[in-house]
Image (cartoon, rainbow, N blue to C red):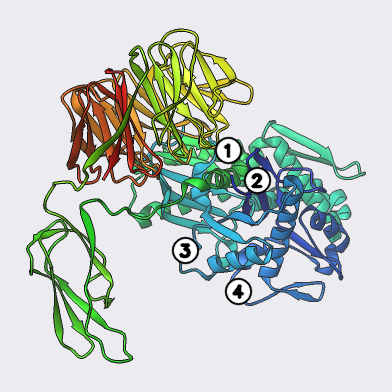
Amino acid sequence: MPEPILAIDFGTSTSAAILVADAGEQVVTERSGTGLTWPSAVCFDGTELHVGTRAENLKRVHADHGRYRSEFKLELGRDTPVELGGASFPVPVLIRAVLAEIRTAAERAAGEPVTRTVLTIPASYDEADARRRLMVEVAEQAGFDVVELLTEPVAAALAPASGPPFAQGSLVLVYDLGGGTFDTALVRIGQHANRVLGHAAIDPSRGGHGSGGRDIDAALYDELLKSGGKPLANLVTTSRTRLQLLAKTEELKRRLTESAAAEDYFGDSDVLLAATRDRLEELAAPVIERTLDCVRGLLAATGTALDDVDEVLLVGGATQMPVVEQSVRAALGRPVRTARAPQLAVVQGAARFAAAASTRFTVPSVRRLTERPVRWPLPDEPGQPATGTLLRWRVPVDGEFGAGQVLADVRLGDGAIWELRADRPGRLAARHALEGGTVFSGDWLVTAAELSSESAIKPRRLFEVIKSGGYHIESLAFSSNGATFATGHYSGQVLVWDAGSGTAKWASSVSGANVPAIAYSPDSARLASASQLIVLWDVNSGRQLSTFSCAGVTGLSFHPDGKSLASSGTSVRMWDLANGSHVTRSPEPANYVCFCPDGSKLASAHQDGKVRVWGEPRGDLTVELAHSDPVFCLAFTADGGSLATGSRHGLVTIWDARTGQSLRTLSGPDTDIRDLAFNPDGTLLAVAGGDECGLWDPVTGHALTSVGHGGVNLVAFSPEGRRLVMAGADDYARTWLLG
């Protein structure tokens, strides 16, 4: 990770934070606190504003002076300030104080500045809600430069929970019973992101009856006070003693989670406080019933039948009471999951979201070799920009047009209508303006594709190399700096060649015949080869740096950070290059393995026709692609969004690497596909198999050209994409310039 990210769940009664960094995830705690959460509380002592556990401790001193407040999150968005001991504080100032204190603790734990946060917000803070903007502003005032918002139910659905991960496409009802409020939401589980379909809440600050854990505490408090009779009433006469009884109430309630009965003396007195789980469940029943009414209202408002809900997820500290799960299961009749740490579920989900920050990116759309941008000049007046209103499109997307054909009509400012005509035949690949929208002179309004499938690519052979004695080339790789390429041979030899001249820089042998896999490190300084051992070589000198024992390797791929190496063969393994230790990603035999360029995914190809895509660094299986035949090779596009697979009988399939959707099938040579490679910008796919290497446009599926070469099994692009090396069973490696 380029920088640490702090995930924060700022809750109504308590808050929680997890620091996400290269070293892993760490719960951020208070110096003065004893638990994993922070009280969302403040106390003003007349001079300084204290927060968290310090505020909770001071409220005993200032309880009768109106200097303490909690649950002020419920008042965000109102103009009325909070009065603390005669001083007025806007609610955003109080929230900022808590967030700033959490950030300070995170920096203490990280040992470096923490300026980026993922901040969870209720689902009710929709895009038009001013509270969303206020939370961003408050976090920025607390010292964060980058503030990312995540709705609480979406975060909850990402948190560790009992059972396997939620299936893609499933509908999850999130039941969040916290200390001060109850929230529920319907969340659709997606491949890239979860989506809230509807939400509802019981918010006491907005006229709802209290339905949080605090309300159950209050009911038990009244029960204890009543059962204690006059002796207890005589002791509980001040704000401080009332706070002491409330603290004892909360302690007894927690103990009843594990025991059928609990008791303790009040302070130093001989007044015994006793409670049973059965009575607690009776007191909690009205609160739980109000939450279930809220759930039923959400289902009715969204037109969702209970049978459409796949699972119910319980989060929030109050769901730790056994009666909550029992009541929800009985009332809804749907499978119920519980968060592994209910009180931390939202922040744990936010931490997972933060850890995946590097996967949330997009890259510019690449203009295909057969596509061109089309712009039109519009007549203008001196000092006035040439603009118009696009009235209508005349040709649909993917529609063909001839030279001089009208593609669209534009009305200029003076009311005249001008036609936008084509200069030559083509196909309308994309439109970049909406009917009724304003267009400017010179705007890129259309992407046009050529009708002819003939390619302008005319490969020209630069040179060829051969190892004396004629040993089959079994593996091939091009360095990322473009200076060298390497070959592994059936004889057990590894050779590194100058990519400009084709002269051999060095050659070396490894134990055991055959080198079926070879790979360069991202910095081009090391080379990994596989035979009976995995060997790391110094690219400049040919010196062996280290060896790892691993027989039967069929494929190698460096992680982009250069610290680890994936191998396929009898299993799929991840090797730590610092110490040679490894973990198994899949125990099943695999033919090939490769990382996507950003390292967020690892793909493996198997004899049973399965291709498995693993999310890194956790190693979660995210996508499984099924083929009818064994898959021999894989290739990712530069952005990691697409994955090409090659199998028997010339079948090449291009997949969406995130969803597993098949995008396109190419009919290659009528033989097994032995190797695939995308050029750096993803506009070309090289397909090796049989006696040729074919070049394809992976978007249109058009075959562009092919290069004859006996027994082509291997192919690799140079980093700038203009050179292509092919090798195979005829013992030659040939370098071609793509003109």
Q: Earlier in the sequence, mark 3 or mark 2?
A: 2
Q: In this view, which residue lies farthest toward the top?
A: 512
Dot 2 falls on a residue whose secondary structure is strand
Q: Earlier in the sequence, mark 1 or mark 3?
A: 3
Residue 555 in view (yes/no)? no
Q: Earlier in the sequence, mark 2 or mark 1?
A: 2
Asked whether the residues under the numbered discs 1 and 3 touch, taking CB atoms below 8 Å apart as contact, a structural biologist would say no
Q: Nearer the viewer, mark 4 or mark 2?
A: 2
Measured Cα–Cα span from mark 1 to mark 4: 36 Å
Q: Nearer the viewer, mark 3 or mark 4?
A: 3
Residue 708 at x, y percent in the picture: 19, 29
Residue position for label 4: 78
Measured Cα–Cα span from mark 2 to mark 1: 29 Å
Dot 4 falls on a residue whose secondary structure is loop
The answer to which image quadrant residue 93 occupies is bottom right
Measured Cα–Cα span from mark 3 to mark 4: 17 Å
- Tell which of 649 and 86 is nearer to you: 649
Measured Cα–Cα span from mark 3 to mark 2: 24 Å
Residue 142 at x, y percent in the picture: 69, 63
Residue 583 in view (yes/no)? yes
Q: Nearer the viewer, mark 1 or mark 3?
A: 3
Residue position for label 2: 18
Residue 323 marker: 1
Q: Amino acid at mark 3?
A: Asp
Measured Cα–Cα span from mark 1 to mark 3: 32 Å
The answer to which image quadrant residue 706 occupies is top left
Q: Residue at x 50, y 30 (%)?
A: 619
